[in-house]
Image (cartoon, rainbow, N blue to C red):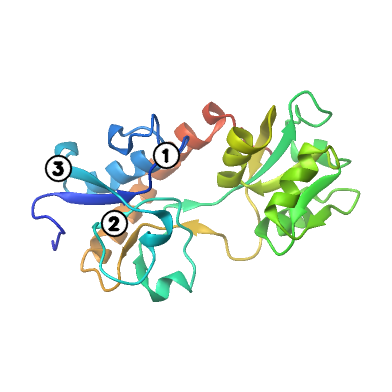
Amino acid sequence: MQLLNPGKLTIGTDKPAYEPWFKDDDPSNGQGFESAVAFAVAGELGFDRSEVQWSTVKFDAAFAPGEKQFDFDVNQVSITPDRAKAVDFSKGYYTVKQAVVAVEGSKYAGAKSLAELKDAKIGVQVGTTSLDAVKNVIKPADDPNVYNEQIDVVNALKNEQVDAVVVDLPTAFYVTAAQVEKSKIVGQFSSTGGTPEEFGLVMEKGSALKPCVDKAVDALRTKGELTRIEEQWLGSAAGAPELR
């Protein structure tokens, strides 16, 4: 196995490392979704925890062209054809879900199913998988309010111009943590149709590690380990129950 540092698996991620992807800004504690996935992959590759070391890598630098200071990087990086020209991606380890965000105590904040959102006025960004999901999955009675920029969607919720907004789950965690006071994730759901957005582990272009990492991700998926990690860190416990 060709490694950056012999005998050690070097994993890159950004700092600060936010919840629920990491916990206590410490990727090395195995807590949080990305940390748990990284250690699970490391385990499949035959490394125990003492043989894993972490390297701080800015988000954009992870998939920029050039040499890398990591064996793989884990940082909610969506696999895109454009990025794949500069780096290698593992198979997807997480399929991005959609999420409904509302203000606590508002009319739709307590919805337990997609059907309960039928009459909601929903805000969503143009050209996104979120917009497709609103139209194809929620199918609200009224056309959603469609905005050009993500920040306009957030402001619409802040200013009570909409009852709820639909964004991808990673964005929803950020909106509720940092952007809209007293907002909450009503729930998450899978978007249907289109090519699903997936997170991949990032490796240097032409990395000899790629086949091994792909095999590790496949094994974790087959065993149900990826689903278990997702449910533990990105599910109800993280405040994002499934809407059916």
- Within the image, what quadrant is residue 162 found in? top right
Give the x, y percent position of residue 203: 30, 63
Label for residue 221? none
- Within the image, what quadrant is residue 170 found in? top right
Furthest-bottom residue in view? Answer: 85
Distance of label 3 from label 2 (alpha carbons): 14 Å
Give the x, y percent position of residue 164: 78, 40
Q: Which residue is denoted by mark 1 in the rendering? A: 33
Task: Residue at 40%, 31% (x, y): give it.
Answer: 23
Give the x, y percent position of residue 17: 41, 40
Q: Which residue is denoted by mark 2 in the rendering? A: 72
Say whether disc 3 or disc 2 marks the residue closer to the N-terminus.
3
Q: Residues within 10 Å of mark 2 (few under 14, many from 20)?
A: many
Query: Callout 2: helix, strand or loop?
Result: strand
Say whether disc 2 or disc 1 marks the residue closer to the N-terminus.
1
Task: Residue at 65%, 53% (x, y): give it.
Answer: 191
